[in-house]
Image: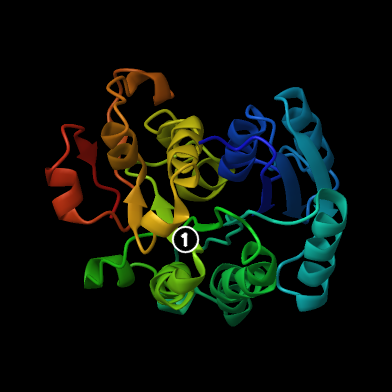
Amino acid sequence: MNLAGKTLFITGASRGIGLAIAKRAAADGANIAIAAKTTQAHPKLPGTIYTAAEEIEAAGGKALPLVCDIRFEDQVQAAVDKTVETFGGIDICINNASAISPTPTLMTDMKRYDLMNEINTRGTFLTSKICIPHLQKSSNAHILNLAPPLDMEAKWFAPHVAYTIAKMGMSLCTLGMSKELAAQGIAVNSLWPLTAIDTAAVRNVLGGDAMSKNSRTVEIMADAAYEILTRASAECTGNFFIDEVVLRDAGVVDFDQYAVSPGSDLYRDFFVPDAVCEALPTKTLTIY
């Protein structure tokens, strides 16, 4: 199974992991709806929906850049309607858009709290809801949330309660919708990285260039997402996948190809359960 002719609706696909997933699908000849806000380049946030469209089409796919702020129902509805009008339907919904502010309670202003929950939890729920009527018509429908495992340990909440609530809210969408939609043949899964990934969030929010060097590239998430999205939806739902685990199960043995600086220590990402790390040969440094 591949993604040739499939239509993917991806939030936040103007850069980073979302764009990498889009380009991996485009290599098969997929149609990609890029639902994101960025129309003009920012010094610290390279890429727009238009430059993303160019990269997707250069990779072999068809692209539809859509100005869309997923906090607003009318904008999501309009973007989904335009996608269906252009490509004839939607086969895959990827909830990638996210806001991050890993700050303790007293340092988290309510505007930032609301932003994280509106984009992460509410945005995932809203985008999924509006895509579902079209996914019901697909022969192999998937919803993939870029969200962590539900590892309900205090250590994940204590340093940044608001951010963790917002990300775990996305994971709760996976937990509930996977059961709700199973009878309709719509797979709902989460995917999360074992290690830090070299994105704007890592460079601008978490650790700068120093942390970037101890991260993996976005391609590991793109390859893992591809493995999930090409599985039969009726047989693959309700999972909280970790990128390296997915790829090892698929036969990948060379993970140096994904390192920003091969040979460097890798930082373990937030929310990855201890048991997962202990079962893998990759050794990681904790950042919590």
Query: Front-most of 233 and 177?
Result: 233
Q: Quadrant of residue 236?
A: bottom left
> Which residue carries the number 1 mark?
187
Query: Front-most of 226 and 150?
Result: 226
State the count of labels: 1
Q: Residue at x 64, y 27 (%)?
A: 27
Query: Where residue 107 appears, x then y in whole percent?
Result: 48, 73
Query: Front-most of 131 and 136?
Result: 136
Evaluate whether residue 56 shows in this view. Answer: yes
Compared with residue 80, is residue 46 higher up or lower down, i.e. above or below?
Answer: above
Give the colour scheme shown.
rainbow
* In the image: residue 17, left or right of residue 170: right
**Type of the residue with mark 1:** Ala
Please state, as top left, top right, bottom left or bottom right, where the C terminus lies in the image.
bottom left
Compared with residue 105, is residue 201 higher up or lower down, i.e. above or below?
Answer: above
Q: Residue furthest bottom?
A: 110
Query: Where residue 85 appears, x then y in whole percent?
Result: 87, 57
* In the image: residue 153, left or right of residue 110: left
Q: Residue at x 45, y 73 (%)?
A: 183
Evaluate whether residue 163 shows in this view. Answer: no
Query: Where residue 171 appears, x then y in whole percent?
Result: 42, 68
Compared with residue 82, is residue 30 higher up or lower down, i.e. above or below?
Answer: above
Query: Where residue 55 appears, x then y in whole percent?
Result: 74, 29
* In the image: residue 222, left or right of residue 280: right
